[in-house]
Amino acid sequence: MPEKNDIEFPKHFDGRRFFNPGGSHLNGLGSVIRWKLTTRPEREAAFFDDVMPCVPPAQVDGERMRITFVNHSTVLLQHRDVHILTDPIWSLRCSPVQWAGPKRKRNPGVHFEDLPRIDIVLLSHNHYDHLDLATLGRIQQRGTAKFVVPVGVARLLERNSVGPGHELDWGHSVEIGAAKIHAVPAVHFSSRSARDRNQTLWCGYIIECAKKTVYFAGDTAFGSHYAEIRARFGAPDLALLPVGAYLPRWFMSPVHQDPAEALRAHEILGARTTIAIHHGTFQLADERIDAPRRELASRPESFVFLANGEWKEVAW
């Protein structure tokens, strides 16, 4: 059962809807219309056939963590007997339908059939590029995974025969096997339709495993939550930080950080290694999907970009 820690985060629910403490202002329909009428996405190829898929091992032994970047915000973490998958999506589109909506520009870096056993699936919020029901259904059919979700999201999974789902509020945690999962704040929003905005929570996660920590930020704008998370959990050994879908800034900054802000977050957290996520597969904003890597061409070695299918091992 999920448990509440001694950690208390600011109030973020008004009795009807969730909100970002500190008043991060979310854009409404008028701003969406202005964005679509006044700017155009940077043009690029419809599809990049440059992915070299990898086959992850069935298990990673020894004192190491293997991080495989599958695509977008989907990362496979493997350490001994713990296999964790973040925000998995293998569908062609991140959309309520597969005949319209944002279409992938790169293939996943791991064929679904080549996935090892999955023990834990972390879902950061209910947006279609992070919660893909078709993919979750395929994972469910394998019969081994437990799903960790923010408050309000388990009902969606249950309606689609996916589970069990462990719902966590910020500051709550659950132990699954050798991992302890803590839900932590993010600066974002939720919705799967025009009528359910902010009726479910969004979050990041701290994963405690073998006396070390992974921070999966989910989808977030830049904010004071990074300093809060470091103060409460210490500097993470590994961080997964979003870098994409950031232009135009007047529209995207309340919900998505840009590459420079992601680098600032890496420094504030004091992460030993950061892997960039939320890039390289779907063009969800005006910049090209590989713009974040170019923007951070002069980044430190500890801030790592992986292509779909690339992997890295770190001492653990």
Image (spheres, rainbow, N blue to C red):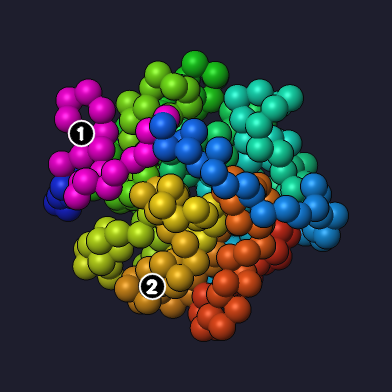
Q: Main secondary structure of the magenta part?
A: loop
Reading the image, the residue beneath label 1 is 13
Q: Position of residue 258 (x, y in %)?
A: 47, 62
Type of amino acid under label 2: Arg
Q: Residues within 10 Å of mark 1 (few under 14, many from 20)?
A: some
Q: Residue at x 30, y 59 (%)?
A: 223
Near-viewer residue (307 or 191): 191
* Residue toward you, 25 or 303: 25
Q: Dot 1 lies on which element?
A: loop
The part of the image, by quadrant, that contains residue 257 is: bottom left
Camera-side residue of 96 and 38? 38
Horizontal side, residue 67 vs residue 120: left or right: right
- Quarter-wise, where is residue 227 in the image? bottom left
Query: Residue 28: within the magenta?
Result: yes
The residue to which callout 2 is attached is 264
Q: Which residues are magenta?
A: 11-29
Location of residue 4 with respect to 232 vertically, above or below: above
Q: Is residue 137 left or right of residue 87?
A: right
